[in-house]
């Protein structure tokens, strides 16, 4: 196969930032994706419906003329979030979902949740109105090893929430373990998971063996090879509960390359080329469209995009090592192998 036409993909977990960084990275997503679930971990976070509406306006204002892209906004859940504000933002079409960050789990998560019982009224309201919860699934306890934090989160936090609020629709985001894949497969009710591009490609050796590679450091951190293989199996299987959330998370090179560097891989420009390579290697290119374009809208109760993109296979396609933004240079994810599929203009 050398040509593949699929419904236009969506990105169900994306960081666009704000200001000059937003302007720099947005065109890379809008070039290929129809919609994206836009993460609310700005400083300060996007907590209220009014803040989400204002952020959506800033994103649309930063969109280059002639490009089509629909940002799907997310409210950052805090212990003070008002269930009525969430419901109103959902009813008005301003907010598509709510994001649960355990406090301290990742970049700009200080305002996240410490006591999960405090947010129970919000979760119950969301279950009632059918609004999904996006979950950063890692515990933050310093006594839990960073490579175990996702598995422990499932047992200590996710499973109890699902028992207490069974009608809540939950997306376990950027899953990185066999444990998470198994949990989603074994729990059919109201549960799905996103998988990033980079977690289909790197394992923890890529970060740590033969020298430290800050551009591969993201959260949740990449795990052992057996976990990467489980993620590839889940993503390429066509199973409708798994779909693409790139977690493309731009940080400038100075912020990545320092004694305590930021977490995040910037994959927006080359994600579709990378994914085509992964699915082709698995012999399952026919399931790429389900993962990038069909399963996500189905879970969110939205139509698939009406237009298509065509991927063409040929001589290796190159992407710039880094892009320049008004906020500084941002390094593009290096998959470590040649990419043969490009998106036809
Ligand atoms: C994200 C970011 O930089 O905002 N970083 C990351 O490594 N994925 C935060 C997140 O999604 O955890
Ligand atoms: Zn993220």
Image: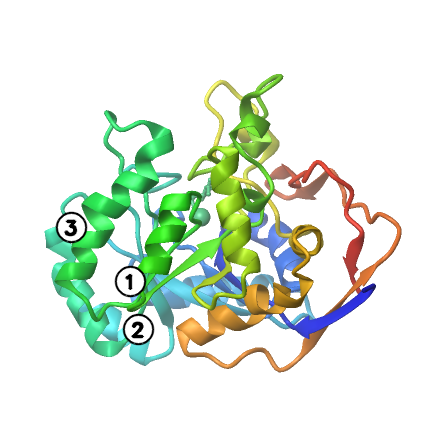
Instruction: Give the vertical position of 205 relative to 319 (above or below).
Output: above
Nearest the viewer among 63 and 217 is 217
**Position of the N terminus by quadrant:** bottom right
Of residues 158 and 124, which is closer to you in this image? 158
Instruction: Tell me whether circle 1 and circle 2 mark residues in contact (CB < 8 Å).
Output: yes
Q: Earlier in the sequence, mark 2 or mark 3?
A: 2
Q: Whole-percent x and y of residue 150? A: 33, 41
Q: Secondary structure at mark 3?
A: helix
Look at mark 1 in the image and give the residue it sits on.
48
The residue at 38%/31% (across/down) is 147
Number of numbered discs visible in the structure rendering: 3
Q: Residues within 10 Å of mark 1 (few under 14, many from 20)?
A: some
Q: Which mark is residue 116?
A: 3
Residue located at (60% from left, 42% from top): 201
Q: Which numbered tag is attached to residue 89?
A: 2
* Other residues around mark 3 within 10 Å, as few (<14) / some (14–19) / many (≥20): some
N-terminal of the pair, mark 1 or mark 2, is 1
Q: Nearer the viewer, mark 2 or mark 3?
A: 3
Compared to 101, does 300 lie above or below?
below
Ligand 2 within 8 A of label 2's CB?
no
Q: Residue 238: x percent and y percent? A: 54, 66
């Amino acid at each position: 196969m050398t040509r593949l036409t699929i419904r236009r993909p969506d990105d169900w977990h994306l960081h666009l930032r704000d200001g000059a960084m937003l302007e720099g990275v947005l065109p890379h997503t809008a070039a290929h994706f129809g919609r994206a679930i836009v993460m609310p971990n700005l400083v300060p976070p996007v907590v209220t419906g009014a803040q989400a509406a204002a952020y959506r306006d800033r994103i649309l204002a930063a969109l280059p003329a002639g490009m089509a892209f629909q940002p799907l906004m997310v409210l950052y859940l805090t212990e003070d979030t008002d269930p009525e504000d969430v419901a109103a933002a959902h009813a008005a079409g301003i907010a598509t979902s709510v994001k649960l960050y355990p406090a301290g789990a990742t970049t700009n998560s200080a305002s996240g949740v410490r006591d999960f019982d405090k947010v129970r009224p919000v979760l119950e309201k969301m279950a009632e109105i059918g609004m999904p919860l996006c979950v950063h699934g890692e515990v933050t306890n310093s006594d839990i090893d960073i490579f175990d934090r996702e598995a422990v989160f499932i047992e200590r936090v996710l499973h109890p929430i699902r028992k207490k609020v069974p009608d809540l629709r939950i997306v376990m985001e950027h899953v990185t373990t066999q444990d998470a894949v198994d949990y989603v497969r074994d729990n059919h009710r109201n549960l799905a998971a996103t998988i990033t591009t980079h977690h289909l490609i790197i394992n923890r050796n890529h970060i740590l063996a033969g020298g430290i590679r800050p551009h591969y450091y993201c959260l949740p951190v990449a795990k052992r090879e057996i976990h990467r293989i489980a993620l590839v199996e889940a993503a390429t299987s066509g199973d409708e509960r798994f779909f693409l959330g790139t977690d493309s998370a731009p940080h400038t090179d100075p912020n990545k390359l320092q004694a305590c560097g930021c977490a995040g891989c910037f994959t927006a420009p080359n994600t579709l080329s990378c994914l085509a390579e992964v699915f082709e290697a698995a012999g399952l290119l026919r399931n790429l469209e389900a993962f990038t374009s069909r399963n996500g809208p189905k879970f969110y109760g939205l139509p698939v995009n009406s237009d298509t993109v065509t991927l063409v296979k040929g001589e290796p396609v190159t992407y710039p090592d880094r892009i320049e933004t008004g906020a500084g240079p941002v390094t593009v994810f290096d998959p470590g192998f040649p990419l043969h599929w490009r998106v036809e203009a």
